[in-house]
Amino acid sequence: MNNLPDTSTYPTIWDKPPFIKKAWLRWSIIVGATLYLIAALTSMDINIQRLLEGIPRGQRFIDSFFPPNFADNRGVVWEGILESVWMAIISTVAGIALSIPIGLGAARNLAPLWVYMFCRFIIAGSRTFPEIILAIFAVKLFGFGPFAGFIALSLGTIGFFAKLLAEDIENSSEAQAEAVKATGANWFQWINYSIQPQVMPRMIGLSVYRLDINFRESAVVGIVGGGGIGATLNTAFSRYEFDTAAAILLVIICIVMVLEYASSILRKWVQ
Amino acid sequence: MGAVMVVSKENNDLIWKRRTSKEQWVNWFFWLLGISIVLFAWNIISEKTVWFFVQDAPRQAADMGTRMVPPKWSYISKLVKPVWDTINIATLGTIIAMTIAIPVAFCAARNTTPHSLVRILALFIIVSSRSVNSLIWALMLVFILGPGILAGTVAIGLRSIGFCAKLIYESIEEIDQNQVEAVKATGASNLQQMVFGILPQVLPTIAGVGIYRWDINIRESTILGLVGAGGIGLQLNGSINTLAWTQVSTILLVILFTVFVSEWVSAKVRGAII
């Protein structure tokens, strides 16, 4: 009977292993994070007086949102929404049309190094600046109105779509490309029959997703003069017509929900 | 499989086709529909465009370009505080978002939600937070909280809840149920099952999503200053309005650098976690 190990020395309480296993790393992250938080919060310079003032103001602000007023500015809101929809559609299409050559060029398995570097540079540039900064410059160059918004959103689409397209092409199956090449296909046939069918399902899903993003972004490029529902929203805010602003926000939320639902169905259907 | 090779006959030669003629027609129909919609949309936008301005754009661009170089490097010393503010807005905003997003995600996931009504509420929070852009959140919060960093931080926080909660709840729904079962078999309560069965499985996702969103938020917080919500956007807006183009180019370069560094940091950290 004595060959059983003595269990009394085993711990009876089990502790969860820590997420970060190295103790020194864990502690230095905790200490560093705490120091950073203290520094950040003290430099934030929060004015308590102003905050207390803000509470009744916020209350009034939220009150003036309700009930949302769909009736008074219906014509303008409807026009703004339509403009945003059209803007989102053409900027998605134009953006994707520009993204395809750039995406092909940014895939290392298709393009020589200098083309690759050049296309990656375009993608990085487009991804760095938010659509709204692109929109500010587009408005400066092309004047107020939806055309500037269209340019900004198209350029924004490149960074997103070309990057994902390039990554998808790089991940596509070598064997199929090889097989099509072996039949003596020229470059366009090769791309069209071996690469395109492999990346198409995901790209269709992504284009619908980007359409969704472009519609949402079209709501803000208007703030800097890029047209669309954003312009209407901005006007409503500056005229203190918060009930109309609430109505616009609700319409945006509804359209985004519908788009999101539609894109999930479409993606399931394509794949 | 019943897949049959599609061929057409020409001069007694069989020629391979990618699609049957029915598929071909459907395909053409969708292209026609798509192109019509695009042309229609283009028509509407072009009616609202002053083409004279567009034709003038290349000249304007060249003009702006010459005004932007060389960047005014001495201005960088004035940008240190705004960049620090921008980073704080992004970081604190992400922390706020994650604190709210994790409980919301547990309420929204089908396998952990306390009640289906709670789930609908959680999904509604997610959708409304995602559909309203951070700039619009900031626009509203500046009215309530006054201009400054706080409005920006809260705006970034509110905007990020939906994104983080959505990705987290999707990963909660995909967990391995066996581990939860095993924890349950030891007599653990619901809360203990969550902490010891579910949380360890989704913790890498949570950390990854947080870092990823932080990276996006750095980018978003550079523009919040446009509506008065703090950060480097304030300087950008001021410089554009006063036509100080050499300052504008300096600011753009600083933004480029900040975004580049944040992307590098986030890639490193995510690489270490996953």
Image (cartoon, rainbow, N blue to C red):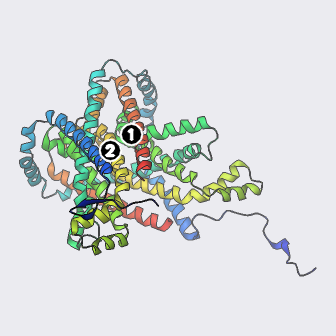
What amino acid type should be assigned to the residue bearing mark 2? Answer: Leu
- Residue A147 coordinates in the image, percent (x, y): 18, 40
- Residue A261 coordinates in the image, percent (x, y): 43, 41
Residue A101 to residue B112: above or below:
below
Q: Which comes before the other along the chain, label 2 or label 1?
A: 2
* Callout 1 crowding tier (Cα within 10 Å): few <14, some 14–19, many ≥20: some
* Callout 2 crowding tier (Cα within 10 Å): few <14, some 14–19, many ≥20: many
Q: Determine the secondary structure under disc 1.
A: helix
Return the residue at label 1.
A259
Checking the image for residue A35, the label placed there is none
- Residue B2 coordinates in the image, percent (x, y): 45, 59
Q: Would residue A72 appear left or right of B154 to someone viewing this image?
A: left
**Badge 1: chain ID:** A
What amino acid type should be assigned to the residue bearing mark 1? Answer: Leu
Q: Residue lying at the far bottom in this picture: please name it.
A: A3
Return the residue at label 2.
A211
Q: Would residue A113 appear left or right of A206 to someone viewing this image?
A: left
> Along the line of sight, which residue is nearer the eye, B9 or B108?
B9
State the residue at coordinates (35%, 69%): A176
> Along the line of sight, which residue is nearer the eye, B107 or B6?
B6
> Along the line of sight, which residue is nearer the eye, A97 or A196?
A196
Q: Residue lying at the far right in this picture: please name it.
A: A1
> Along the line of sight, which residue is nearer the eye, B69 or A216?
A216
**Badge 2: chain ID:** A
Q: Would residue B234 appear left or right of A262 to someone viewing this image?
A: left
- Residue B192 coordinates in the image, percent (x, y): 70, 52
Q: Determine the secondary structure under disc 2.
A: helix
The reply to whether discs 2 and 1 touch (Cβ–Cβ < 8 Å) is yes
